[in-house]
Image (cartoon, rainbow, N blue to C red):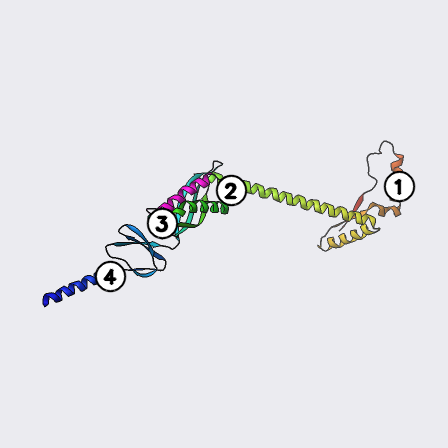
Amino acid sequence: MAWILWLVAILLLFLLILLAASIRVVKEYERGVIFRLGRLVGAKGPGLFFIIPIVDSMVKVDLRTAVFDVPPQEVITKDNVTTKVNAVVYYRVVDPEKAVTEVENYSYATAQIALTTIRSVIGQAELDELLSEREKLNQRLQSIIDEATDPWGIKVSAVEIKDVMLPEGMQRAMAAQAEAERERRRRIIAAEGEFQAAKKIAEAAEVLAKQKGGLFIRMLQTITEATEEKASTVIIPFPVEMLEPLGFLRTQTRENSGSSGSSSGGSSGGSGGASAE
């Protein structure tokens, strides 16, 4: 009877080992791809399931989004500018069966596709497009890489160009160009301001010319503004016509009409000035 008990114990131990070998547990973000005698059965999970020991084998596949950091790539753009570009690629497995059976190492294959695609696309773009239309290039890269990895069951969700490193000489040239552009805008804005101010002054002069006494009132306002600064010397301009009641303007007119050869030397009207301490 002892040997029978030993035999039963060995059988129970063997069954426990088989049961332990047949139990598989995969997490929520994983899938188990089952092969039976080398042939694909399918993907199972998540949770607990059983396989046939020795006959079945399982490969775990992670379904979470993976990130691949593309190292800086030295690329010559379409307009013959040498630059270094690095990027980041986000991808995940959407079909675990294809990811295992269609490609040997889907992570390495996706990384190599991303490297070659980035070099190719950047080489077909100009430097201005690379700097100002980066979002357009990101979408183009994502579309090309996703199309290439689709037969492997890989979905490329995003490709982002992180940094564009330019030669030092190119950086100085771009800085000088930007400074010149800002100076051009400053001059245009200043010229537009002068033009608008000149138009307003001309309109004000026209209004003052139409209104009798308007120029005199404006002169008094100017005197008031000048005396508010507490200056020791004030220069007050006044029209020459104010001297007409004193007879100065009529005397000057007779002298000018009596002299010969001086018809083009003076002006008929003007302004004078008085200084007061």
Boundaries of the magenta span = 102-124
* Camera-side residue of 33 and 8: 8
Residue at the spot of label 3: 98
Residue 110 is inside the magenta segment: yes
Q: Residue 251, which numbered label?
A: 1
Residue at the spot of label 4: 20
Residue 116 is inside the magenta segment: yes
Regarding residue 205, the answer to whether it shows in the image is yes
Residue at the spot of label 2: 129
Residue 269, x across and y down, in percent? 83, 42
* Camera-side residue of 233 and 162: 162
Mark 1 residue crowding within 10 angstroms, few (<14) / some (14–19) / many (20+): few
Q: On the rendered structure, is 146 left or right of 32? A: right
Q: Which mark sits nearer the N-terminus, 4 or 3?
A: 4
Secondary structure found at label 4: helix
Disc 1/disc 2 C-alpha distance (Å): 77 Å
Disc 3/disc 2 C-alpha distance (Å): 37 Å
Q: Nearer the viewer, mark 1 or mark 2?
A: 2
Disc 4/disc 2 C-alpha distance (Å): 60 Å
State if disc 1 and disc 4 touch (CB < 8 Å): no
Q: Nearer the viewer, mark 3 or mark 2?
A: 3
Q: On the rendered structure, is 19 left or right of 205? A: left
Disc 4/disc 1 C-alpha distance (Å): 131 Å
Q: Which mark sits nearer the N-terminus, 4 or 1?
A: 4
Tag 4: amino acid: Ala
Mark 4 residue crowding within 10 angstroms, few (<14) / some (14–19) / many (20+): few
